[in-house]
Image (cartoon, helix red, strand yellow):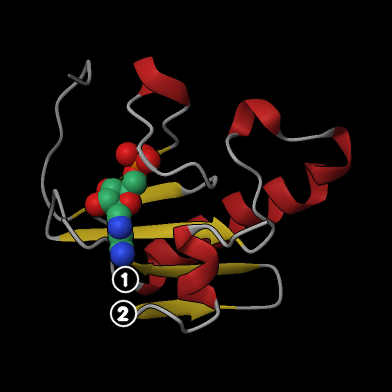
Amino acid sequence: MSKTLFEKIAARELPAQIVYEDDRVIAFRDIKPVAPVHVLIVPKKPIPRISEAAPQDEALLSHLLSKAAEVAGTLGLNNSGYRLVINNGPDGGETVPHLHCHIIGGRHMGWPPG
Ligand code: AMP
């Protein structure tokens, strides 16, 4: 199986501005930011999308979310707030088939999303 885009970033085969990494997740700046702060946090395991996560991925998903909040804090977003987004499938706007959570902040965001 060929590596996903985000596996290549984790393997340092593609450049990225990495802001956090541990044995299970990696976080790096989005190449096309939609806000002053836009980081993706990604499980190193290449789960294609949240709808394909398995019961045994539960601890990894928990780790992903708690690290997303920790990274948002280290990026200075705790007081102003931020949004965590997971796009799933065509209607969700998913473009990279390797599960990732967007951490977006530094400006006010509207609701509902477009
Ligand atoms: P999604 O549309 O939820 O699948 O999000 C995919 C995100 O990956 C988009 O926001 C892209 O801008 C971002 N992206 C694509 N290629 C790269 C890359 N090489 N480095 C960083 N972010 C990327």
9 relative position to 47: left or right: left
* Amino acid found under the numbered disc labelled 2: Gln
Q: Horizontal placement of 83 versus 36: left or right? A: right
Q: What type is the residue that disc 1 sits on?
A: Leu
- Quadrant showing the N terminus: bottom right
Q: Quadrant of residue 56?
A: top right
- Answer above or below: position of 105 versus 20: above
Q: Quadrant of residue 18?
A: bottom left
Crowding near the residue tagged with mark 2, few <14, some 14–19, many ≥20 C-alpha atoms within 10 Å: few
Say few, some or many: other residues with alpha carbon within 10 Å of mark 1 (under 14 / 14 to 19 / 20 or more): some
For the residue labelled by badge 2, is the local secondary structure a helix, a strand or a loop? loop
Report the residue at 37% width, 48% height from top: 102
- Disc 2 to disc 1, how far (Cα)? 13 Å
Q: Give residue 9's position: percent from left, percent from top.
A: 45, 73
**On the image, numbered disc 2 is attached to which residue?**
17
Residue under label 1, please give it: 75
Q: Earlier in the sequence, mark 2 or mark 1?
A: 2
Point out residue 28 in the picture as x, y percentages from the top left corner. 38, 70
